[in-house]
Amino acid sequence: MPLFITDWKAWSTKDVVAGITVAVTSLPQYIAYAELAQLSGFRGIVASGPPLIAFAFLTGNPCLNIGVTSITALMATADLKGAEYREAFGEAAWSQILGTYSMMIGAASIVLAVLGAGRLVKHIPAPVKAGWKLGFALAACAAQTPSSAFQHAKQLKKICVLPIVNGQPLKSGAANMYRLVWTLTHPMHWDAEAILFSAMTLFIVMHFKSPLKVIAATAVGAGVSYVRQYQGDVVGLPPPGSELHITGNLQADLTSWVHQWPWEMPIDATVARLGGWPMAILSAVAFAFVDYLAIISVEAERPAPGGSRPSREMAGQGFACIASGMGGSAPVGGSLTRSMLAGMIGASSPMMGLVCGFVTMCLGFPFIATLLEPTPKAVLSSTVLAAVLPAVVAPKDLLRLKGSDALAGWISAAATCMTDPTKGFGIGCATYFLFYGMRRAGKTSATTK
């Protein structure tokens, strides 16, 4: 039987140590993935604790850690065309739309869990998963390259002119991939200081094995930036009113992280942004399925001692996404690196996640914001690049495939990076089953003859 948080006999001091360690070492990721979702970095800290707490009460895996990841941040931003929306209406309005979408994905996850759909996710074709993983990694690289190569990420849009196709410039993933190729082939436009910060961060994160390496890279980057008075994009101070404060009013203190209650969310505007109710429902359900893939991949590396209950884990994902939406942040998913760290320390029960959630919330107080203010965005972007580059350089799962499976995998990868992760996943599944049907038809024809 899975060990749930109510099994208090399984609690241990290692749960506390693991929870604190994972929270502190994840601080740079909280900021980087918030930036990836077109939010201020500090919101990534404030909104990360409650989903962890909600998930801890449902999961049966002591090591499974959940939060905004590069996958969920990129997918949500792509689905909602977040960069365009934020530029037009500002971060406050974008945070409301993004949070509403997180809530919708959470609700879809809960409904799917009740229907027992968690078991179906395990049957997603391997070629689709392999291709989607590579396509997403490429999309993540494209999203992070501007901040890694330029002092000001917006500079790339000014100097890189998109080609016109059918009377309009490239859009969505295709535009991002074009800018990625353009940046890599025009090093003369790179900014030396941004490149130095990026190279330093990549070296520390990819060369050393210490679980504190990401914190070390961020601390070094912030220190050098402060001393040199770096003029490029930095984390900066949080938007006014976004910090956590202790006022003495118990109700106000307990809900200070809430950015919007479910009944205050702009559901109609979010649905319109997604293309109407049919597309909104389809997007939320597809996102919930793809999101659960992350939990499956984590459990493959760190299986629960007593087994897993897919429906309960998927429901936990749903409630965690709703909590993240209330915090005005992106949907959450399973994090492999944080989960592996918890397992390495020896977490023995979901108490680890509860401790991690509360410690993460404590990181949202103003003095933390002051320490993080000078951190260059080139450093944060490079921490994300360090996580996804291995999947780009050596897509092992995809390279093992042969024949029509390999073709389906590569089509999935191309569709994912050229459109968006959700559409890429759908195109990949459709392609795989088309090839599968053709193979079956060929075998039937051969047998008949």
Image: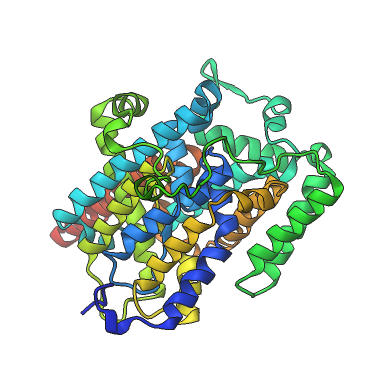
In this picture, is 246 found above or below 314? above
Q: Is residue 335 visible?
A: no
For the N terminus, give its image quadrant: bottom left
- Residue 320, given in percent of the width and then of the height, sits at 33, 53
For the C terminus, give its image quadrant: bottom left
Depth check: give the residue in front, 305 or 56. Answer: 56
| Residue reaching furthest to the front | 248
Looking at the image, which residue is at 41% across and 74% down? 301
- Residue 240, given in percent of the width and then of the height, sits at 57, 35
For the image, the number of numbered tags is 0
**Left/right of residue 286 with respect to residue 298 in the rendered view:** left
Coloring basis for residues: rainbow
Residue 391: name its quadrant: bottom right
Depth check: give the residue in front, 63 or 20. Answer: 20
Q: Is residue 252 visible?
A: yes
Looking at the image, which residue is at 54% across and 34% down? 174
